[in-house]
Amino acid sequence: QVQLVESGGGLVQAGGSLRLSCAASGSIFSINAMSWYRQAPGKQRELVARVFNVGMTNYADFVKGRFTIARDNAKNTVYLNMNSLKPEDTAVYYCNADITGYDYRSTAYWGQGTQVTVSS
């Protein structure tokens, strides 16, 4: 069993910053890509940023230059540093990780989600 536990969401004013964390635990042989998604009310879940185990990163255009994704492989943790937040960044943010277990099977796991609210 694998768990992803997120933390760091909250309420912030426009222009402010937040840092999200997501720690993976359980039966983990290796972690491949780790990602952050978000879902606003009435909208589909969308990819925000992704970091691969070799360090390469991808960002959605709407966060480039404002958000930074990073991971600590020793802690099986991924972070999302969010700066210059806008009201349109308001959403539930979900952590996703592609994890290989000791049976050498890869599975995508999701965190429970953390609410980020940006007031204008």
Image (tube, rainbow, N blue to C red):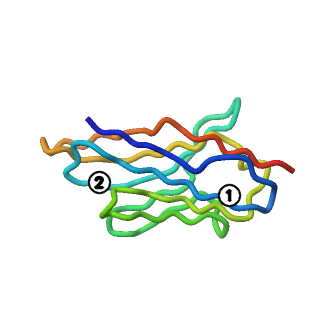
Residue at the outermost left position: 103
**Which quadrant holds residue 41?**
top right
**Which quadrant holds residue 101?**
top left
Tag 2, which secondary structure? strand
Q: Is residue 109 above or below residue 50?
A: above
Residue 1 percent coordinates (x, y): 25, 35
Residue 86 percent coordinates (x, y): 77, 55
**Which amino acid type corresponds to the residue marked 2 in the rendered image?**
Ile
Task: Name the residue tied to disc 1.
Answer: 62
Please tell me how crowded label 2 is: few (under 14), some (14-19), or many (20+) other residues with Cα within 10 Å.
many
Task: Name the residue tied to disc 2.
Answer: 31
Q: Are marks 2 and 1 in contact (CB under 8 Å)?
A: no
Task: Judge from the rendering whether residue 107 lies leftward or rightward of residue 63; answer left or right.
Answer: left
For image coordinates 73% across by 47% down, the residue present is: 11
**Which amino acid type corresponds to the residue marked 1 in the rendered image?**
Phe
For image coordinates 67% across by 34% down, the residue present is: 43
